[in-house]
Amino acid sequence: MTRMNSRPRALKGRGALSNPPGRFDAQQVTAVDDGWYLEEEPDSIATTLEPDKARGIITTNDSPDVGFDQSINPYRGCSTGCPFCFARPTHAYLGLSPGLDFETRLFYKADAARVLEAELSRPGYVCKPIMLGINTDAYQPDERRMRVTRSILEVLERARHPVSILSKHSLVLRDLDLLTSLARDNLVSVALTVITLDDDLKRKLEPRAASPAARVRTLAALAAAGVPCGVMVAPVIPAITDHEMERILEVCAAAGARWAGYVLLRLPYEVKDLFREWLAGHYPDRAAHVFSLIREMRGGRDNDPRFGSRMRGTGPYALLLRNRFRLACQRLNLDPMTRGALDTTLFRPPGPAGAQLRLGL
Ligand code: SF4
């Protein structure tokens, strides 16, 4: 069951402007004003959390352009609420909307630590770095009370398992004790995503993320604690955020970022219409121009899912972005997307924490 606003508008603390049916939904809803009365629509929607029924916790992939083989996503859905989020379409597999449902109806990995211990202790497990929170942010607002990500990180730290983290939230600093322990053995890297330094734009684009200044301070705190860190400018949105690329890299390099990456806006499946709606709501004067630049970089389409071009786009505008990024990284001594290999040789199967304590290990 999905909800469709008759007059899409931003709800308090939410990014998507509506809740359209997912692509597998048998029911398609079209709003029609019949002139009788307008149903009252709430100003805000509460977030709900349910246990995720999926049994496994480590996901593997063989995509040639993502830079990791294994990942863990402690949550499905993300209340940070970015309207452009490429993970939104995954909510359609749950029979939910990639719109507001994605940011309000969340699922968490129940019993995450125990399931992870079992998977890492399986005979034949081959240690490769795990990317934590690549699909949905592992430090999104509800992690503060749920502590699912922390429980996963505790297992990885005990197993001396390498892990990379990508987040928009300062909450990552809560786990600095674990991160510094991992960093001592070259077992961790952390990247903060920064797409704008403009607070007003951030509120519209990433409603519940940390402020840009807080993210820069987070980088500085990580660097000061000896945790290798970098910045991801992702996504770059033409004619909305692309002019900020050099300034973001400068500020983050000064805070202690060692490497940097960027990804061009991707609009798979339902995201293209959600983003079109967001543009029409917030930047109606620029919407046509933004989409014309997107299509120029996407071979005439709204989205290009092909490996090799989906991250950076093609054509003159995409080439210009690529050159600007390369030159800024050179000038600022930032490694472009090379965070360095993490150590896989120290891994030991974790076993339950309680058992280790009883044995006095
Ligand atoms: S923080 Fe990341 S995962 Fe969460 S909504 Fe934004 S882009 Fe998606």
Image (cartoon, rainbow, N blue to C red):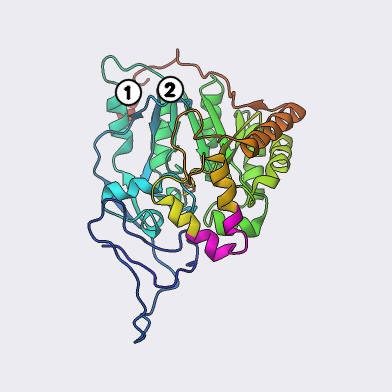
- Name the dominant secondary structure of the magenta segment: helix
Is residue 284 inside the magenta stretch? yes
Disc 1 residue type (three-letter): Leu
Discs 1, 2 touching: Cβ within 8 Å: yes
In the rendered image, which residue does mark 1 sit on? 120
- Secondary element at tag 2: loop
Across and down, in percent, residue 149 comes to: 42, 40
Queried on whether the Cβ of the residue with tag 2 lies below 8 angstroms from ligand 1, the answer reads no
Quarter placement of the N terminus: bottom left
- Secondary element at tag 1: helix
Identity of the residue drawn at 51% across and 39% down: 299
Is residue 54 inside the magenta stretch? no
- Can the viewer see residue 168 in this picture? no
Quarter placement of the C terminus: top left
In the image: residue 182, left or right of residue 51: right
Which numbered circle lies on residue 309? none
| Residue numbers of the magenta segment | 277-289
In the image: residue 333, left or right of residue 317: right
Q: Which residue sits furthest right?
A: 331
Report, in whole angstroms, how far the alpha carbon at label 1 lies from the one at label 2.
Answer: 9 Å
In the rendered image, which residue does mark 2 sit on? 161
Disc 2 residue type (three-letter): His
